[in-house]
Image (cartoon, grey):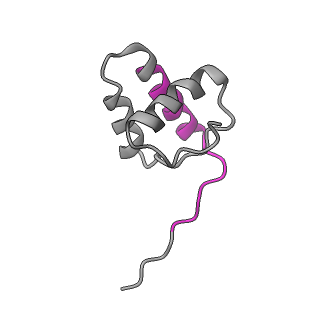
């Protein structure tokens, strides 16, 4: 059984953008940021393109990327 490589997502849908923003807010306002990281992983957004988000949200997602195993998040630098 051959595994087909997954195509990278270029632009998140409106729903996916909402989930990314929710994760950034969770990271900003809760103590256990692992919950926000787990949300992104469960929703299949561990490799999302975050380039369209504002800098404040990107900063929170950088923390998740660097500290919680979301190294594939794109558009944060």
Report the magenta residues as a range.
6-26
- Residue depicted at x 53% and y 27%: 21
Where, by quadrant of the figure, is residue 38 drawn? top left
Residue 27's x, y, as percent? 42, 22
Residue 26's x, y, as percent? 41, 21
Check residue 42 for magenta coloring.
Answer: no
Residue lying furthest front? 66
Please identify the quadrant where the N terminus is shown: bottom left
On screen, 47 above or below 16? below
- Residue depicted at x 42% and y 40%: 40
On screen, 51 above or below 27? below
Q: Is residue 65 left or right of residue 41?
A: right
Residue 51's x, y, as percent? 67, 38
Relative depth, front residue between 59 and 51? 59
Check residue 12 for magenta coloring.
Answer: yes
Q: Is residue 17 left or right of residue 11?
A: left
Q: Main secondary structure of the magenta part?
A: helix
Q: Is residue 3 left or right of residue 54?
A: left
- Residue depicted at x 49% and y 25%: 24
Where, by quadrant of the figure, is residue 7 drawn? bottom right
Please identify the quadrant where the C terminus is shown: top right
Residue lying furthest top? 29
Residue 29's x, y, as percent? 41, 13
**How many labels were placed on the picture?**
0
Relative depth, front residue between 43 and 49? 49
- Residue depicted at x 44% and y 43%: 70
């Amino acid at each position: 059984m051959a595994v087909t490589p997954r195509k990278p997502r270029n632009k998140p849908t409106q729903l996916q953008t909402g989930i990314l923003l929710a994760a950034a807010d969770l990271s900003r306002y809760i103590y256990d940021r692992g919950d926000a990281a787990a949300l992104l992983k469960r929703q299949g957004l561990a490799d999302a393109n975050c380039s369209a988000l504002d800098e404040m949200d990107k900063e929170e997602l950088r923390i998740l990327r660097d500290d919680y195993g979301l190294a594939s998040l794109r558009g944060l630098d």
